[in-house]
Amino acid sequence: MIYYARMIEGIYAALGIMVLLSIAAFFLAESGKINNFPTYAIGILFILLIVLERSAVRHFDAHLVLGITGLLTYFSLSALWADNGDFAVMLLYFGYSVLILSFVYSVLLLQMHYQEFLRFLVWFTVLAAVVSASYSVHLHYAFPEYQPLLEDRLVALGRLHNPVISALSYGMAIVMALHLLIHGTNNNDRFFSGFCIIVLLVGVTLTYTRSVWIGISVATLYAIALYFPGSTWRRVAAAVLFLSVVVAIVLASFGWDELVKRSTSFRPEIWGELINRTLQTNWLLGHGITADSSVAHSSYEHGTFSFHHAHSMYVATLFYGGVVGLLGFLGLLVYLGLRLHQANSAEMRGLATMALIYSVVVMFFDGDRFLAKVDYFWIVFWLPVAITLIVDQQKRN
């Protein structure tokens, strides 16, 4: 019996290490293969843990398990009716679904087993992002001649070579650092959290990605409403001051002419084209998860541009999964929000709510397939889902 207990403890320890490695590899590893390895190990260890310690499933809420699993299963099956999909591709996406479920529920199990795991995971994610941002900013200025993009935008370290991906990922780390700043137990914690926020803001600014500022702003306004001391008028004043600072930073970074020139970056044209395609073909079930969502747009002023995906998670979900898929995704978001609303006394409710708010906002402006191997969406969406599951479990206990 003692050897069995030690084996279970060893599995938990290995699982925790792999979850942390998956975060670190995303921010710091250049190769996707390096990033994928810890997620495969998480899947194996999670299944092994569920088989050996069946009591672990008592932490799972049946409705959430059904909702998340059902959504992932539906989009995996959608490969069957995609033009370029088949049974083998469907099995591949089922594998991705298992990896996502293993990651999300491993975070929950680890928090139940190690009571401080979530706090450590949040610190670890922030620090990994800070290391990535600081070194990327250094390289940006140290080697200005190395600029693979046409524009002078930050090309970040690790899996964050795309400026939009790096901005969205750093933005989630900023939300987490803001939570650490608010709940710092001493001045040293608060000072270091503030320092991390500044470093990450520099990284976000150099990516010249506008949508992330909207997500950070909405999440921060929620934090002001929830945590700022004093009367309602003091909260309003703090919110106005914060928004003024954000507007000043954005104007100083982009300049008014650049903001006007980039306008909406063809988002309405891309969304309109993909929505029309969906409504004219299979509006109920969509085109399938493997369908090509590229859009070519021509204009007299700008010439012809090719866009490789929807640039909105909601439009992409409609395109790939139709009305059924979009309603399922929106239903999951609403249900997660309701569970957070009911968890008034849960310790991490503020973090989960800020993270989910940030995710919901930025997904409106960017995103493609939410069913994929480990990428930025695991940080921006699936990690907040895992935190929400922890909050819901704390409420039920």
Image: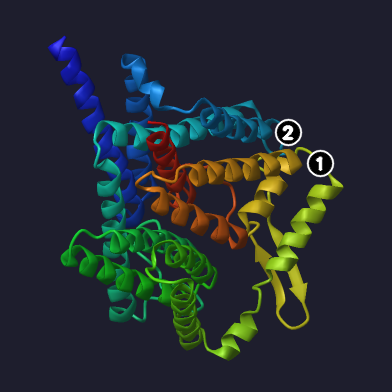
* Quadrant of residue 389 within the rendered picture: top left
Secondary structure under badge 1? loop
Q: Indicate the amino acid at tag 1.
A: Asn
Residue depicted at 65% across the width and 63% down the height:
307
* Residue at the far left in the pictured view: 2
Residue, x 72% and y 67% (percent of image)?
268
The residue beneath circle 2 is: 81
Residue type for callout 2? Trp
Nearer to the camera, 337 or 266: 337
Quadrant of the snapshot with the N terminus: top left
Residue 47 higher or lower than 343, as above or below: above
**Front residue of this view, candidates 47 and 89:** 47
* Label whose residue precedes the other's in the sequence (1 or 2): 2
**Where residue 237 sits in the image (x, y, percent)?**
46, 79
Residue drawn at x 84%, y 44% as measured from the top left = 281
How far apart marks 1 and 2 lie (CA) works out to: 10 Å
Crowdedness near tag 2: few (<14), some (14–19) or many (≥20) residues, C-alpha within 10 Å: some
Q: Mark 1 points at which residue?
A: 282
Q: In this view, does 108 lie above or below 239?
A: above
- Quick one: 141 or 130, which is closer to the camera? 130
Q: Where is residue 92 in the image (x, y as percent from the top left)?
A: 54, 31
Find residue 144 and report its image quarter: bottom left
Name the outermost residue toward the top. 1
Is 128 positioned to the left or the right of 295 in the image? left
| Coordinates of residue 362 in the picture (x, y in percent) | 55, 61
Helix, strand or loop for disc 2 = loop
Q: Which is closer to the viewer, label 1 or label 2?
A: 1
Camera sees residue 49: yes
Within 10 Å of disc 1 (Cα), the crowding (few <14, some 14-19, many 20+) is some
Along the horizontal axis of the image, is 226 left or right of 277?
Answer: left
Q: Name the quadrant of the C terminus.
A: top left
Q: In this view, does 137 lie above or below 113?
A: below
